[in-house]
Amino acid sequence: TFIVKDINPGTGSSNPTGLTVINGKLYFIANDGTHGAELWISDGSEFGTMLVKDIIPGAPGSSPQYPYSSSLTHVNGVLYFTIPDHVWAVDARTGRQLWHYQWQTTGGNHLGNRGVAIYEDWLYFETPDCFLISLNVKDGSERWRKQICDIDRFYYASAAPTVVKDHIIVGVSGDDFDIPGYIQAVHPESGEM
């Protein structure tokens, strides 16, 4: 075992997450102490380990203050990843941003967002204010939105949806007042249960 590259030299940690192998290269989210949490690539060598792109310039990076990071989802040469209220599609080879979607939040618990699900040509993700959003994977345009929980009852949504056959499984979390979380299945075309 050896360190390939010290991304955040000194006493700080680069906190790598979302480790995803694509065509023999490792993609991940890491913090170098300068750019914040951003997308990185490694071929297993020191010189082949580098920042793909500073997607949100500045120290906070693409994943500021969110302790629960997105998983990277790779489909047909495109990486999809999230933070609360945002989804990016990035060319996995070049790091070029293909599109970015920003949800106009109405509140909620912005602890993190754990990723997306893709079914056919549609992407699905949850928002902290309890919506399930369906986007076109080609251009990020919104297809529909469905409320899946009630923030007034202190629920929040951050899980990555999951595809099971012809259903999108979503989960919401309860709160500190012993309100239980739950999962539900929705139809991928309509978002209806």
Image (cartoon, rainbow, N blue to C red):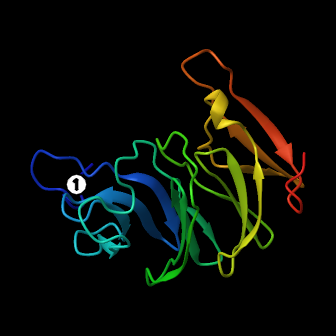
Residue at (58% x, 50% y) in the render: 106
Q: How many labels does the image show?
A: 1
In the image shown, does 106 or 49 lie closer to the viewer? 106
Counting from the top left corner in percent of width and height, residue 134 is at 74, 63
Q: Determine whether, in the image, residue 169 is placed left or right of residue 79.
A: right
Q: In this view, does 7 lie to the left or right of 129?
A: left
- Residue 54 falls in image quadrant: bottom left
Q: Where is residue 2 in the image (x, y as percent from the top left)?
A: 23, 52
Residue under the point 48% across and 46% down = 112
**Amino acid bearing label 1:** Ile
Of 73 and 182, nearer the camera is 182
Residue 84 x/y as whole percent: 51, 53
Q: Could you say which is closer to the camera, residue 186 or residue 41?
A: 186
Residue 69 x/y as whole percent: 46, 49
Quadrant location, the C terminus:
top right
In the displayed structure, 140 sits above or below 148; it is below
Query: Which element is circle 1 on?
Result: loop
